[in-house]
């Protein structure tokens, strides 16, 4: 009896350990920049909204892998379940990373119950079963009509409170993409998304404060927004926060904190953080310390 009870307890412990391990892997993939880029892109695509709904959301159990090498290169292969008020489906994404930036090479949405997949990106001209021949080619640059449609869809989602769309609209204003360039509007939309805890918007808002674009320059605010994104594991934010601590801008100068944050970013493959960390260590600045 005791042996059976012990075996049951052991089995339950193993299930808990395995479940926790799998959950941590899923959270890691969902927090990756490649995942965010994939979700932002499909959320702004009118065809996806028409098929799945304008309230598109990701399911939890993302499958695949995200690998980042020490040199800053990497590869992500993701399968993301999505659903909305019109239907559900699966997003297949393949991205590669060079120089600290992700390049989406393949992005396809397979809508449940629909034979032909929606091909958003196919940069390497892969054969995609069921896709019309013309969509298996590298997509042509967006024309004005396509850009206008993307802007309308993005603005509609942003005005409904979708954080990813608010961030995307901020980027469009900052870059002057499909709309007149306006840093003040960019800051306003970044702030809406950042207030919802959206990491990419938090780091962009911090950068706007740090450079004084669209808002009065304020290093304290810049550091505060970097910290919010850094706490979510955003490597560029961790790198920027490390530099703020190193230089004493917006925060009290603290070499140990600078090294700790730079190391966190460097461990994720951030090349800029690696260079700054190496320079500080060579100068004998900083020591082993956990970020506070």
Image: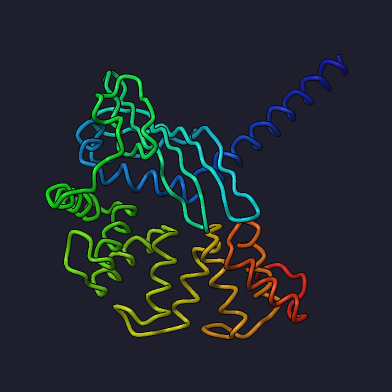
Q: What colouring method underlies this structural image? A: rainbow
Residue at (29%, 57%) from the top-left corner? 166
Q: Quadrant of the C terminus?
A: bottom right
Q: Who is closer to the viewer here, 59 or 271?
A: 271
Q: What x and y, as percent, mark residue 81?
A: 41, 31
- Identify the residue at image location x=37%, y=63%: 195
**Which residue is most to the right?**
2
Where residue 93 sits in the image (x, y, percent)? 42, 37
Q: Where is residue 282 in the image (x, y as percent from the top left)?
A: 75, 77
Quarter of the picture containing the N terminus is top right
| 129 sits left or right of 286 in the view | left
The structure residue drawn at horizontal position 31% and vertical position 42%, both measured from the top left corner, is 42
The image quadrant of residue 25 is top right
Q: At 13% from the left edge and 52% from the top edge, which residue is drawn?
A: 144
Residue 17 picture location, percent across and down: 71, 34
In this rendering, the answer to whether 99 lies above or below 106 is below
Image height check: is 104 above or below 61? below
Tell me which corner region of the image, top left, top right, bottom left or bottom right, holds residue 196: bottom left
Q: In this orientation, which residue lies closer to the viewer: 264 or 231?
A: 264
Q: Total marks drawn?
A: 0
Left or right: 81 in relation to 30: left
């Amino acid at each position: 009896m005791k042996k059976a009870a012990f075996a049951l307890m052991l089995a339950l412990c193993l299930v808990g350990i395995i479940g926790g391990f799998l959950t941590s892997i899923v959270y890691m993939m969902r927090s990756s920049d490649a995942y965010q880029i994939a979700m932002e892109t499909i959320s702004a695509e009118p065809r996806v909204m028409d098929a799945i709904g304008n309230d598109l959301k990701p399911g939890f159990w993302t499958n695949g892998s995200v690998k980042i090498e020490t040199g800053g290169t990497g590869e992500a292969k993701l399968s993301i379940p999505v659903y909305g008020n019109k239907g559900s489906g699966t997003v297949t994404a393949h991205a590669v990373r060079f120089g600290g930036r992700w390049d989406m090479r393949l992005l396809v949405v397979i809508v449940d119950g629909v034979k032909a997949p929606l091909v958003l990106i196919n940069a390497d001209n892969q054969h995609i079963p069921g896709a019309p021949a013309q969509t298996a080619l590298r997509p042509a640059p967006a024309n004005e009509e396509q850009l206008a449609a993307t802007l309308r869809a993005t603005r509609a989602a942003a005005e409904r409170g979708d954080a990813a769309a608010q961030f995307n609209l901020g980027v469009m204003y900052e870059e002057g993409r499909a709309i007149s360039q306006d840093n003040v509007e960019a800051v306003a939309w970044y702030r809406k998304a950042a207030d919802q805890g959206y990491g990419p918007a938090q780091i962009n808002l911090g950068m706007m404060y740090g450079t004084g674009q669209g808002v009065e320059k304020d290093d304290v605010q810049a550091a505060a927004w970097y910290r919010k994104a850094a706490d979510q594991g955003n490597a560029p934010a961790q790198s920027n926060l490390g530099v703020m601590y190193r230089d004493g801008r917006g925060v009290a100068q603290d070499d140990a904190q600078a090294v700790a944050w730079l190391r966190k970013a460097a461990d994720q493959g951030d090349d800029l953080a690696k260079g700054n960390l190496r320079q500080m260590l060579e100068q004998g600045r900083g020591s082993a310390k956990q970020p506070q």
